[in-house]
Amino acid sequence: MPDFLTPKQRSAHMGRIRRANTKPELIVRKLLHRLGYRFRLQWKDAPGRPDIAFPGRRKIIFVHGCFWHQHAGCRLAHVPETRRDFWEAKFARNRARDARDLARAEALGWKVLVLWECEVGAQTALEETLRDFVGPTNSKSIHNLDRA
Ligand SMILES: [Zn+2]
């Protein structure tokens, strides 16, 4: 949890977070913390309520599960054999919603990073991706956290 939430905000978050805490998202959040960034979770003032938001920088990150968001060409994004019509309809809705959220966010001036579950494992590449996207941290302690 970010340490700048009030107890009330914190408990309001907890209810949502239990549902939202997928493992890839946790990995990204932990890494961002270690890099010294401050961010918001499930930011409701941006389209699609992004998993991670930097409101001051006007940047948001979606961490997408490859199955639910049907990562194109990904081995994790298979369509189940049973109830195929159901799944295809559901995935089509998810993809349409993702595309709509992305377009709206960009139209409102948000910079958007979409991270896919299958890409989150490679920590070094992820760290670079996050630094490039979010930009310099304001914290001086970042220098102690830098890895050679
Ligand atoms: Zn994937």
Image (spheres, helix red, strand yellow):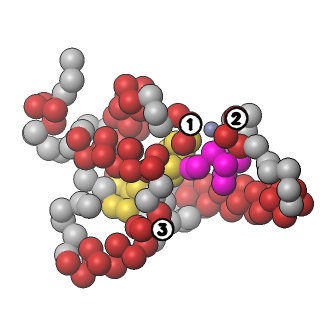
- Tell whether circle 1 marks a residue whose Cβ is less than 8 angstroms from ligand 1: yes
User: In this image, 78 relative to 109: left or right?
Assistant: right
Q: Are marks 2 and 1 in contact (CB under 8 Å)?
A: yes
Q: Position of residue 22 (x, y in %)?
A: 47, 55
The answer to whether residue 40 is above or below residue 10 is above
Q: Do the residues labelled 3 and 1 touch (CB within 8 Å)?
A: no
State the residue at coordinates (56%, 50%). 64
Count the numbered circles shown: 3
Mark 1 nearby-residue class (10 Å; few <14, some 14–19, many ≥20): some
* Residue stretch in magenta: 64-70
State the residue at coordinates (41%, 55%). 52
- Tell whether circle 3 marks a residue whose Cβ is less than 8 angstroms from ligand 1: no
The amino acid marked with disc number 3 is: Arg
**Residue hosting label 1:** 118
For mark 1, give the secondary structure: helix
User: In this image, 21 relative to 5: left or right?
Assistant: right
Mark 2–mark 1 Cα distance, whole angstroms, equals: 9 Å
Upstream in sequence: badge 3 or badge 1: 3
Q: Position of residue 108 (x, y in %)?
A: 53, 60
Q: Which mark is residue 75?
A: 2
- Tell whether circle 2 marks a residue whose Cβ is less than 8 angstroms from ligand 1: yes
Quadrant of residue 71 within the rendered picture: top right
User: In this image, 34 relative to 29: left or right?
Assistant: left
The answer to whether residue 113 is above or below residue 121 is below
Mark 3–mark 2 Cα distance, whole angstroms, equals: 24 Å
Q: Where is residue 26 in the image (x, y as percent from the top left)?
A: 38, 50
The amino acid marked with disc number 2 is: Arg
The amino acid marked with disc number 1 is: Cys
**Residue hosting label 3:** 19
